[in-house]
Amino acid sequence: MVYHYRPSGVCSREFIIEVDEQGTILNLEIVGGCAGNTKGISKLVVGMKMEEVIQRLKGIPCGLKKTSCPDQLAIALEKIKAQQLP
């Protein structure tokens, strides 16, 4: 399933996240933001379970901001998980 998420408080404008029925991230495209960092995050999380990504990335700040692209990804994945519950 493919999900679209609009992050807030960061430079990125959209996350396009594809996950399978088992909660594994199949693809992540981050639109906007710091190209090297967002491409790196995308490559690292493909093949990982959503729970592990949430655990590793939730709460990471960016400079003086209280959130970051990794934190926003964790928030997006939490929302996806909530939608998948029966």
Image (tube, rainbow, N blue to C red):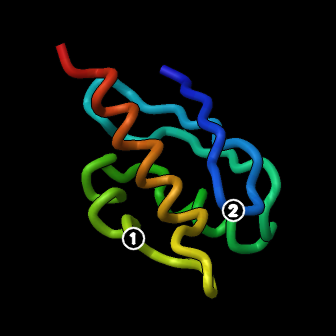
Residue found 51% across the figure and 78% down from its top? 61
SS under mark 2: loop
Q: Which residue is drawn at 40% across and 67% down?
A: 57
Residue tagged 1: 59
Q: In which quarter of the image is the C terminus?
A: top left
In the rendered image, residue 15, in percent from the top left (x then y), is placed at 64, 43
Quote the CA–CA distance across marks 1 and 2.
13 Å
The earlier-in-sequence mark between 1 and 2 is: 2
Q: Residue 43 carries which label?
A: none
Residue 2 vertical placement versus 65 (above, below): above
Q: In this view, does 83 lie above or below 72?
A: above
**SS of the residue under disc 1:** loop
Q: Looking at the image, which residue is at 55% across and 27% down?
A: 3
Residue 13, how many percent across, how many down? 76, 47
Badge 1: few (under 14), some or many (20 or more) residues near its Cα, within 10 Å?
some
Q: Quadrant of residue 36?
A: bottom right
Question: For this view, does 73 lie left or right of residue 35?
Answer: left
Q: What residue type is labelled 1?
A: Gly
Numbered-mark total: 2
Count neighbours of disc 2 (C-alpha within 10 A) and say few if under 14, some if 14 to 19, many if 20 or more. some
In the depicted structure, whether residue 13 falls above or below residue 70: above
Judge whether 35 appears above or below 45 on screen.
below
Residue on which the image places disc 2:
10
Q: Which residue is nearer to you in this view: 42 or 10?
A: 10
User: Picture quarter containing residue 27?
Assistant: top right
Name the residue at 64% across, 69% down.
Answer: 40
